[in-house]
Amino acid sequence: MCVGLSAKVVNVKDGTALIDANGAKREVSADLLEDLEPGDYVMVHAGVAIAKITESDEEEAFDVMEGLL
Amino acid sequence: MNEQAKKARDIITNYNGRPLRIMEVCGTHTHEIFRIGLRKLLPDNVELISGPGCPVCVTPVGFIDEAIWLALEKGCVITTFGDLIRVPGTEMSLAGARAKGAVVRPVYSPLDAVEMARQNPDEQIVFLAVGFETTTPSACLAAETAKKEGLKNFSLLTANKTMPNAYAALVGSADAFLYPGHVNAITGTAICEDLKEKGVSGVIAGFTASELLTALAVILKNAEKDEPFFVNCYPRVVKPEGNPPAQKLIEKVMEPCDTEWRGLGVIPMSGMKLRDEYADFDARKKYDMPEIKGRPNPACRCGDVLQGKCKPCDCKVFGKVCTPEHPVGACMVSDEGACAAYYQYGGV
Ligand code: SF4
């Protein structure tokens, strides 16, 4: 139940965001993120967008490590 | 494999420092680490142990009994994350209660349960609110929405939990924690900084193969220095301040309380309950629920598994009486449960 889903925001209206997660579209609550805009990437959990994601490419994780080693 | 992945893998396989016990607090980490085969890379002196971060696993027997009481005695419709349906209560699970007439419906989000209440004014809908800081905001949003709309047929049965006091209870069971990234997405990094000040090491980890490989390499690299460390290895999602609107909402709707963790007993101030202003949406108050105490199956060692004191395969009934089809304890139910992960991936 704890798995998060990263998705792209397609549309935001009245506290609800339409998101696209690998082609699957659904509506989630956008109430907990300020200034959400179409094109942003978000982490979704239990029907609520809980975090904006700055990097859409997860491989960036390795760059983080590069800086730490 | 790209250059960096190779470098991370080399750090892990070549580690020859002091023996290390790393606790993956979160059940999704346990599952993903097995699935991508990371355990096979670890040298003998690095041990991964599972922690109490699967909300389904730490939900006590009594909570399931409470939900069954609401369904069978009060005729409420129980809505819940699907995993909870098969978790054993004292006498039966919610799946078992269905056979006795209970109405139990899985939902993806507590907001879906609110929608169900809107659509079905003749039904009394109760949502089983379990989960950590990641999930609690969605339950608070549901309570807030129901209050705003004046819904009379929606309430929450809460068993929400928070991590900081649980970490305190676990200090000493591991040399470093793999902190659950999605909890920190809400809370921010201050908790981990505090733990570092107290001598507890850890890194915040994401969930993909590259993120987990990175997080483990960073732990092993830092462990060589022999002083407490904390690194946020999931900055694309976790910001130092976390999610302030979510924190404010939780603060508005809920307050800390003592709570029971399956197998660990009561940890003071490690739970969240609805504030008095939301009493109409608190199923325990709304239905004047008596105190219900659960009796766990004495064979089940979930408590020891959740504290890293034993491996699932050390439990006598693991894989024999207790399987994902017939779970005896909660840790065998959800994919995120340590026992279920060991069962599925062969008890490495
Ligand atoms: S194998 Fe089953 S009974 Fe044993 S600790 Fe795990 S869940 Fe409990």
Image: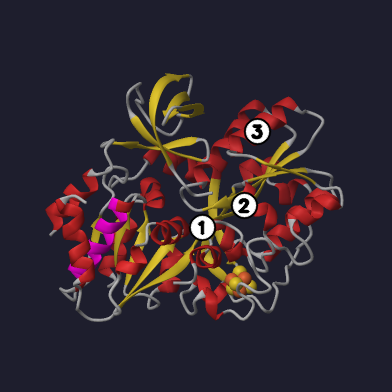
Q: Residue at x 62, y 81 (%)?
A: B316
**What percent of the width, then of the height, locates residue B170?**
43, 73
Q: Secondary structure at mark 2?
A: helix
Q: Secondary structure at mark 3?
A: helix
Q: In which image quadrant can residue B271 be found?
A: bottom right
Q: Are marks 1 and 2 in contact (CB under 8 Å)?
A: yes
Q: Which one is in front, B74 or B288?
A: B74
Left or right, residue B299 beside residue B346: right
Residue type, numbered disc 1:
Glu
**What percent of the width, then of the height, locates residue B335?**
54, 56
Range of residues picked out in magenta = B210-222
Q: Which one is in front, B323 or A42?
A: B323
Tell me which numbered mark, 3 or 1, is placed earlier along the sequence: 3
Marks 1 and 2, how far apart in space?
A: 10 Å
Residue for badge 3: B114
**What percent of the width, then of the height, locates residue B177?**
34, 66
Instruction: Note whether B189 is above or below A60 in the view shown.
Output: below
Residue for badge 1: B336
Left or right, residue B83 beside residue B238: right
Circle 2: is it few (<14), some (14-19), or many (20+) Cα within 10 Å? Answer: some
Image depth: mark 2 or mark 3 in front: 2
* The residue carrying mark 3 has its beta carbon less than 8 Å from ligand 1: no
* The residue carrying mark 2 has its beta carbon less than 8 Å from ligand 1: no
Marks 2 and 3, how far apart in space?
A: 19 Å
Circle 3: is it few (<14), some (14-19), or many (20+) Cα within 10 Å? Answer: many
